[in-house]
Image (cartoon, rainbow, N blue to C red):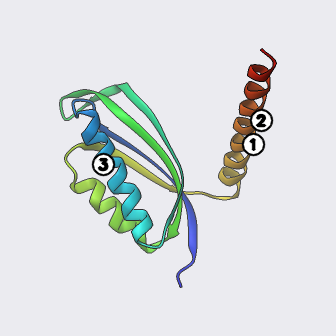
Amino acid sequence: MAQKYQYELTYVISGVVKQNQVDDIVRKVNHLIESNNGDVLEVDEWGNERLSYEINRKRSGYYVNMYFQAPGTLIERLERELKMNDDVLRYLTLRMDAKMKRHYEQRKKRRAQEAAEEAEASDDE
């Protein structure tokens, strides 16, 4: 069994694509990872944002950031699928080093603590 590494993937989907098509692309990426012995840890959809510069005559894009664990052999296939999809404008895959993993864990703890504080505040009302 191949060793799994932790990755961060950010990709931008064309802003002119309808929401159901966006959902399909996100679902396909997740399925590709999971069907190739990977584990999706977190998917964070940032939504439609204005691009810093025009890409393929598009001024806005739907940003998706995700964290996953997978064997290194999957990355080439995943990036090929993203490159072949005309609706995906850009993507960036990073293999997480120790510093990135610490930052990710700290952020998860901070979000959990904020959620617990919000729940406690709403219970008090």
Look at 30% across and 40% down and name the residue there.
22
Q: Quadrant of residue 124?
A: top right
- Distance of label 2 from label 1 (alpha carbons): 6 Å
Which numbered disc flags the more N-terminal residue, 3 or 1? 3
Q: Are marks 3 and 1 in contact (CB under 8 Å)?
A: no
The image quadrant where one finds the C terminus is top right
Vertical placement of residue 6 versus 102, above or below: below
> Residue tagged by mark 1?
109
> Residue tagged by mark 3?
25
Image spot of residue 32 (x, y percent) = 36, 63
Asked if residue 124 lies left or right of residue 37, the reply is right
83 or 30: nearer the viewer: 30
Q: Quadrant of residue 16?
A: top left
Image spot of residue 91 (x, y percent) = 37, 47
**What amino acid type should be assigned to the residue bearing mark 3?**
Ile
> Residue tagged by mark 2?
113
**What amino acid type should be assigned to the residue bearing mark 1?**
Lys
- Distance of label 3 from label 1 (alpha carbons): 29 Å
